Image (tube, helix red, strand yellow):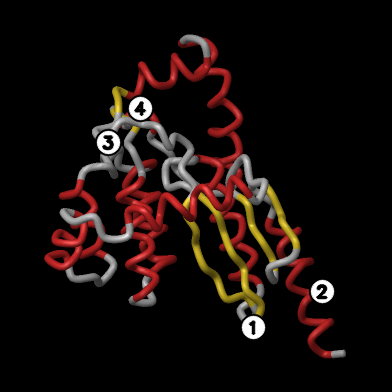
Amino acid sequence: MVKLDILSDPICPWCYIGKAQLDRALEQSPDHPFEIEWHPFQLNPDMPPEGMERRAYLEAKFGGKDGAIQAYLPVEEHAKAAGLSLDLGAITRTPNTLDAHRLIHWAGIEGRQTACVSALFAAYFKEGRDIGDRDVLCDIADGVGLDASVIHRLLASEADVEETRGRDRAARDMGVSSVPTFIVDGRHAVPGAQAPELWVKVIEELTADADT
């Protein structure tokens, strides 16, 4: 097996697109060697715990409404090309994603990490749900086979808060400045939402190396 570490944030549209592109490649290569682990990277580490109103966030980040529209045009184009449906108009709040990252970590312990990441992306980008809301996170946890009552208790505690923040800081210290970032075999960083063809080529090269 070859470790594929993925740094992402569940409110990052390019991470959603990048996962879809990778998934297409993995479907074409069912005998791929990847062992996938998801790692935390907050796009907005200083976001208030309650999040903020979506329109205000976008306009502040992109310098006004027109800037926000221009920034998201390529997102919608690439999502469509990747076969994804987005309902950006349904998103009313930009959340703090610390708790979502904690949930992803706990899902990994139970072997449900990728399913959890997929559910978070769908909840945010397709359903417009506030994935900073702990009740929403518990519902998502239940949907991927985790014990929602356990997740509720964990979220109400400080469990893995500092560890998650520390892992985020470690990624930045390592030089990661944007997501998604894919790290192959602990050595090769692949930034951005890459086409399925690139991943198929990587898989072919890894498989050929393993056979020699």
Residue 75 image-quadrant placement: top right
Residue that carries the numbered disc 2 in the rendered image: 205
How far from the left and from the top, in percent, is residue 79?
Answer: 55, 41
Whole-Å distance between the Cαs marked 3 and 4? 22 Å
Whole-Å distance between the Cαs marked 1 and 3? 38 Å
**Badge 3: residue crowd in 10 Å (few <14, some 14–19, many ≥20):** some
Tell me, yes or no, if residue 139 can be seen here: no
Whole-Å distance between the Cαs marked 4 and 1? 41 Å
Residue that carries the numbered disc 3 in the rendered image: 49
Q: What element carries label 2?
A: helix
What amino acid does circle 2 point to?
Answer: Glu
Of callouts 3 and 2, which one flags the residue occurring earlier in the amino acid sequence? 3
**Badge 4: residue crowd in 10 Å (few <14, some 14–19, many ≥20):** few
What amino acid does circle 4 point to?
Answer: Gly
Q: Is mark 3 on a helix, strand or loop?
A: loop
Q: Which of marks 1 and 2 is in front?
A: 1
Q: Which of marks 3 and 2 is in front?
A: 3
What amino acid does circle 3 point to?
Answer: Pro
- Give the residue drawn at x 29%, y 44%: 131
Residue that carries the numbered disc 1 in the rendered image: 1
- Give the residue drawn at x 65%, y 51%: 174
Q: Nearer the viewer, mark 4 or mark 1?
A: 1
Of callouts 3 and 4, which one flags the residue occurring earlier in the amino acid sequence? 3
Q: Nearer the viewer, mark 1 or mark 3?
A: 3
Q: Quadrant of the C terminus?
A: bottom right
In-image side of 58 versus 196 (left or right) = left
Residue 89's label in the rendered image is: 4
